[in-house]
Amino acid sequence: MCRTLSSATMSDPTKKPEPKMAADPKKRPLAHGLESVATLLTSVEETPEPIPTVIKGNIPSWINGSFLRNGPGKFEFGESRFNHWFDGMALMHRFHICDGQVTYSSRFLRSDSYVQNLEKNRIVVSEFGTLAMPDPCKNIFAQFFSRFQIPKATDNAGVNFVKYKGDFYVSTETNYMRKIDPQSLETKEKVDWTKYIAVNAATAHPHYDREGATYNLGNSYGRQGYFYNIIHVPRGEGGTDGADLNGAKILCSIPAASSRKPSYYHSFALSENYVIFIEQPIKLDLLKFMLYRVLGKGFHEVMSWEPQLETVFHVVDRRTGQLSKTRYYTNAMFTLHQINAYEDNGYLIMDMCCGEDGSVIGNFTLENLKAAGEEMDKFYSSLCTILPWRYVLPLEVKEEEPNDQNLINLPNTTATAMKTTTGVFCTHENLYNHDLLEYGGLEFPQINYTHYNARPYRYFYACGFGHVFGDSLLKMDLEGKKLKVWRHPGLFPSEPVFVPAPDAKDEDDGVVMSVVVTPRERKSSFLLVLDAKTFTELGRAEVPVDIPFGTHGLFNEMG
């Protein structure tokens, strides 16, 4: 059984360890003897029909719904293999929970990419880090000229489950999604964003407001340049036979600082009144992108980290679509996932997981992740530490305000915002104490989204990264920046998802769910259910199948 900790060691909860720290005080302990996780990156079989699980402990009877997860599950076709973790074929998982019992099922997404690769028994559709090679059956001239064709975007939607108008989809970072039956996991209609609005792609991390509308972030490029587009999809009842994105519109178009080298983005922030896009110095070279097939490079190889550039926060009124005239910026940093954003007495507060080296995205190749021994230690130690930061933006900046004076008058924050000749320069507050570094920093943050997204909040949950994959679950109490920790050697938990109790009075009344996998023993995965308040284990549902390490998911509550 796994023990629960409160920022303590596994062996003695009364004594904190004194690990050998890296020279930089913002870095985690130096890696030594990390175990191989290669078995978590191997292809598995699907389980299309629900199977029972073995319950240990107690799964609360009030939980009624399905925990849906997404992620890569097939890494080769025939003799051709994918290069990057992001490239694996999407495998959808469903843990259905009712009356304290749990069943498990999984299905591969029947995307065009999956079907075509399967038919040819080789990789014929390019992915993020894998370039599909020309058909060997073509003559040499056809093979040569095929390199000059821009590959079609993949519909291998293996990043997340999302909702629009009450319907479920799986999504990646191209212009394609797939509608999904959340009960059977059957693949439904292929959805092309370009058929509804003028965007070339959209993120797999939309936000939802309390009126039922959905917001997302896309991009477009043409003669006028490159633009980041805030997308608004109105509420709907769901249950339609086909996909329904009718009424979708572009709320605001933000011109890129450089049309030739726009920024990569994975998500964005949403408060009660604003959408915030973070333009970070992870750059996509469009010229190389157009030629990357000719150059024989994967998509991730045309991206570059440019730390000499600034990071800019674009603030958009989500009701009027008006872009703030104030330019908010900070030093070079990168972020994949935001924790929460809210407004407080004229200030916009943004909490996010940040790092100081954006080259990390291209490093998650399967070769690196499958390293063993000293090579694994070396790879892990090369990755920057991801930590929770807070930025505070003053929403009203008067022209008569003097330069180089802190504009933030909020108590209990060390974040600053100073007016300069080019805008408002922001510095962050660290949302952690030193003990977080013992767990390797954190990523995959989640909150009580239903009741506290875009509002002041106290708690968030995440994976600690003492390995290349999350190897602990963390609960952060922002009052005092105190940690509660669930960790056990050899166990690798997924992104934690909070489910509020039906009679909740406090923010953390509910449970936290995570799918736990291990490289040490086959068919030993389980669904873990923690009491969110105490962060102690309530129960687990053991699954007699192999589950690879996944990406994101959500809980689908059922009446």
Image (cartoon, grey):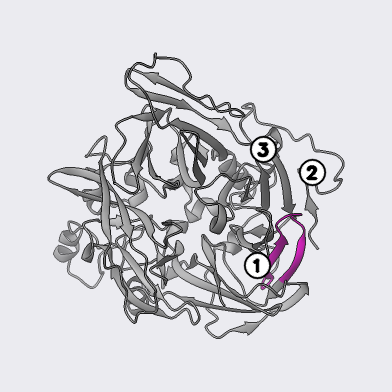
Question: Is residue 39 among what the camera can see?
Answer: yes
Q: Secondary structure at mark 2?
A: loop
Q: Residue at x 64, y 55 (%)?
A: 36
Of the residues tagged 1 and 3, which is closer to the observer?
A: 1
Q: Quadrant of the N terminus?
A: bottom right
The relative height of residue 74 versus residue 6 in the rendered view (above or below) is below
The residue that disc 1 covers is: 502
Q: Earlier in the sequence, mark 2 or mark 3?
A: 2
Relative placement, left or right, of 377 versus 239 is right
Q: Earlier in the sequence, mark 1 or mark 3?
A: 3
Q: Residues within 10 Å of mark 2 (few under 14, many from 20)?
A: some
- Amino acid type at circle 2 is Ala
Which quadrant of the view contains residue 176? bottom left
Q: Residues within 10 Å of mark 3 (few under 14, many from 20)?
A: many
Of the residues tagged 2 and 1, which is closer to the observer?
A: 1
Which quadrant of the view contains residue 166? bottom left
Q: Secondary structure at mark 1?
A: loop
The residue that disc 2 covers is: 8
Tag 2 and tag 3, C-beta contact below 8 Å: no
Name the foreground residue: 426 vs 440.
426
The residue that disc 3 covers is: 437
Relative placement, left or right, of 259 versus 202 is left
Question: Which residues fall within the magenta stretch?
Answer: 522-540
Q: Earlier in the sequence, mark 2 or mark 1?
A: 2
Q: Label 2, label 1: how many angstroms apart (C-alpha)? A: 32 Å
* Magenta stretch encompasses residue 536: yes
